[in-house]
């Protein structure tokens, strides 16, 4: 009874050894022969099948895990991934919903739930984009095209090598070059450089625009053997004599993780690359590094969660002159396998949301490592059916629709005086929900400018000394790169003036048959003087009235004297006569029914013996708001 058990244990041990050495071709039959496979064996089989290009069996391995009921959230994600590879999008969406319930904070789940039917748009074929399998492809791997001196493409290929890598049973990679003979085709393949190509994997590579500096991906090895199956970045310079220097490893490589897939800027001073360094978001992440000087690179920085996911982001290419970073991802919403995405990056580092390039650039298989030219053509890599090898190079034309989507969005504006429309110094705080997105102090005329996202709602809170704070809502519309929201603020002075116009000034009352200013009334008039001094724009109408006792002629004269008494008091205390309009109405405008022939109390008559104050330019003041 122990002999079969020991045989099964031996097979498992041997299969794991092959698997850990990426020798999937020999690991698969051993795993397949093991009876009573557990979830871990099926996981390894799924991965091995996928790498070897048998996507149906990869899906089947994960179906076994799911059917056994002992699975992790990551198993569900991988199962949905393999369903997409096999074109089963609706079924994949069902499992992604379950994944999202189990891992609601996972960015892959959140991006999916933001648009669960994203694939319906991506499946739409863009007939304007033409894709061509280039003539230089052969039965081996050909991938990772890079521009070299505008007329050539340098790519990684397993052609011509005599020794195979056990990971996919293909020869080790070397760098080759070919001439661009049309927008979608290449001719004349030759090895790139004997000094650059080594015993093990070399490629892909990237070059500065001048073609005098390169960074390439290599295995770690010494002269006799492959030390570890990890990738390092190496640099090489074109010597004056025309040959390339011996590639030297970059200082931030590590035995603990891989660094590969370089993407240089035109000047060779900025580089994006892929790495599974600790502290990232998932498997492989995209990093960026800048040169400190002509001979030294700085420390790499993870480009962040806008690009990187819990999955793998790899094969960046950088159009530094246009600001487009292309990369491949299996963590962002895609069609299956790895899809090619693009983000627009501004010089200050602000970037757009990733845009899936859609069909026919992307397929249900692995699509990656795109090289984009100014005329909207270029080349990319794919292992889609119908090719000549496991990975082939494809040429394309008329790819430009992504530019309308890869937009960096900004919310901008000034703080203004509401009355004059002139810019003022102030501060703004931009929030989204409870999150403070940015806070800015602004000098007069200075714009605030904040990086935002389409379809999001923001609140701008503006303040300034001597002004009433104000909040303004802003919704960012897709396709509109800059949303402008100037914030007009009402000054405290203006607000008080408008309230004064609305509430008015209380009347002044008189004793019977008198027009002189009572001592208590002088206190009231002094307050009006202060008011007129504080608000020099006010024009004041002064209109006096009498009660109905005495004749109309007498009362008209009495009301005139009352108005003149008030006007003279104000003028004598520094108020310009030009700001005052004097009127009198006698007994003609009572505030109650106390007219001739009607008996009224003294209190009722008192209400009619008055001088009223009216700000007569309120409409003008209000119209300027």
Image (cartoon, rainbow, N blue to C red):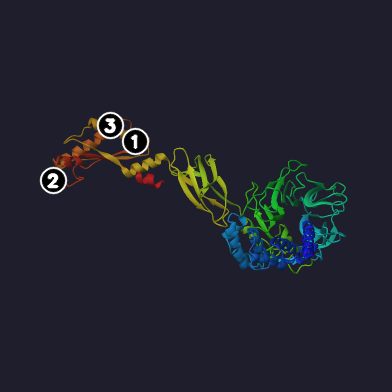
- Callout 1: 10 Å neighbours few (<14), some, many (20+)? some
Image spot of residue 30 (x, y percent): 78, 64
Whole-Å distance between the Cαs marked 2 and 3?
Answer: 33 Å
Q: Is residue 479 above or below residue 494?
A: below
Q: Residue at x 71, y 43 (%)?
A: 299
Image spot of residue 54 (x, y percent): 74, 67
Q: Nearer the viewer, residue 11 or 150?
A: 11
Label 2 SS? loop
Q: Which residue is mark 3?
A: 523
Q: Nearer the viewer, residue 50 or 381?
A: 50
Whole-Å distance between the Cαs marked 2 and 1?
Answer: 37 Å
Q: Earlier in the sequence, mark 3 or mark 1?
A: 3
Label 1 SS? helix
Q: Which residue is mark 2?
A: 596
Q: Nearer the viewer, residue 467 or 48?
A: 48
- Callout 2: 10 Å neighbours few (<14), some, many (20+)? few
- Callout 3: 10 Å neighbours few (<14), some, many (20+)? few
Image spot of residue 238 (x, y percent): 83, 48
Examine the image and state in which quarter residue 394 appears. Answer: bottom right
Whole-Å distance between the Cαs marked 3 and 1?
Answer: 13 Å
Which disc number belongs to residue 191? none
Examine the image and state in which quarter residue 298 appears. Answer: top right
Q: Earlier in the sequence, mark 2 or mark 1?
A: 1
Q: Which residue is mark 1?
A: 531
461 with respect to 404 (left or right)? left
492 with respect to 254 (left or right)? left
Quadrant location of the N terminus in the rendered image:
bottom right
- Would residue 140 be visible to someone looking at this image? yes
Q: Earlier in the sequence, mark 2 or mark 3?
A: 3
């Amino acid at each position: 009874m122990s002999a079969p058990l020991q045989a099964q244990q031996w097979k498992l041990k041997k299969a794991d050894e092959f698997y850990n050495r990426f020798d999937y071709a020999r690991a698969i039959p051993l795993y397949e022969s093991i009876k009573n496979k557990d979830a871990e064996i099926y996981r390894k089989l799924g991965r091995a099948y996928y790498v070897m290009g048998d996507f149906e069996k990869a899906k089947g391995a994960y179906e076994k895990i799911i059917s056994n009921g002992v699975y992790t959230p990551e198993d569900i994600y991988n199962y949905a991934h393999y369903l997409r590879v096999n074109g089963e999008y609706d079924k994949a969406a069902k499992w992604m919903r379950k994944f999202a319930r189990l891992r609601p904070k996972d960015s892959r789940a959140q991006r999916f739930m933001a648009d669960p039917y994203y694939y319906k748009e991506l499946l739409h074929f863009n007939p304007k984009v033409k894709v061509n399998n280039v003539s230089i492809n052969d039965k081996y791997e050909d991938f990772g095209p890079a521009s070299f001196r505008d007329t050539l493409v340098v790519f990684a290929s397993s052609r011509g090598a005599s020794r195979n890598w056990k990971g996919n049973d293909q020869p080790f990679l070397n760098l080759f070059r070919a001439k661009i003979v049309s927008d979608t085709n290449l001719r004349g393949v030759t090895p790139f450089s004997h000094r650059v190509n080594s015993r093990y994997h070399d490629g892909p590579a990237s070059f500065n625009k001048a073609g005098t500096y390169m960074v390439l991906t290599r295995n770690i090895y010494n002269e006799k053997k492959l030390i570890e199956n990890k990738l390092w970045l190496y640099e090489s310079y074109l010597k004056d004599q025309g040959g390339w220097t011996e590639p030297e490893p970059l200082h931030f490589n590590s035995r603990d993780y891989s660094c590969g897939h370089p993407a240089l800027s035109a000047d060779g001073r900025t580089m994006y690359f892929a790495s599974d360094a600790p502290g990232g978001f998932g498997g492989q992440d995209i990093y960026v590094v800048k040169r400190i000087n002509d001979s030294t690179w700085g420390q790499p920085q993870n480009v962040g969660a806008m690009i990187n996911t819990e999955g793998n982001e790899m094969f960046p290419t950088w159009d530094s002159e246009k600001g487009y970073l292309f990369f491949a991802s299996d963590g962002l919403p895609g069609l299956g396998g790895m899809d090619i995405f693009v983000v627009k990056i501004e010089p200050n580092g602000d970037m757009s949301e990733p845009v899936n390039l859609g069909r026919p650039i992307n397929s249900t298989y692995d699509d990656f490592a795109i090289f984009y030219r100014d005329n909207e053509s270029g080349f990319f890599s794919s292992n889609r059916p119908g090719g000549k090898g496991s990975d082939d190079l494809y040429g394309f034309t008329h790819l430009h629709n992504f530019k309308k989507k890869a937009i960096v969005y900004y919310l901008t504006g000034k703080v203004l005086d509401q009355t004059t429309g002139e810019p003022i110094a102030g501060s703004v705080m931009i929030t989204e929900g409870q999150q403070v997105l940015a806070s800015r102090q602004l000098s007069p005329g200075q714009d605030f400018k904040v990086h935002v996202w389409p379809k999001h709602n923001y609140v701008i809170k503006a303040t300034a000394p001597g002004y009433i704070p104000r909040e303004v809502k802003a919704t960012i519309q897709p396709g509109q790169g800059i949303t402008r929201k100037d914030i007009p603020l009402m000054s405290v002075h203006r607000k008080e003036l408008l309230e004064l116009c609305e509430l008015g000034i209380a009347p002044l009352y008189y004793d019977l048959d008198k027009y002189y200013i009572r001592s208590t009334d002088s206190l009231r008039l002094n307050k009006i003087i202060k008011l007129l001094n504080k608000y020099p724009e006010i024009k004041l109408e002064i209109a006096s009235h009498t009660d109905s006792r005495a004749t109309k002629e007498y009362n008209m004269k009495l009301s005139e004297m009352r108005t003149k008494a008030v006007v003279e008091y104000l003028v004598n205390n520094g108020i310009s006569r030009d700001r005052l309009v004097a009127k009198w109405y006698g007994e003609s405008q009572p505030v109650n029914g106390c007219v001739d022939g009607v008996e009224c109390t003294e209190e009722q008559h008192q209400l009619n013996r008055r001088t009223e104050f009216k700000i007569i330019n309120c409409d003008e003041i209000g119209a300027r708001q």
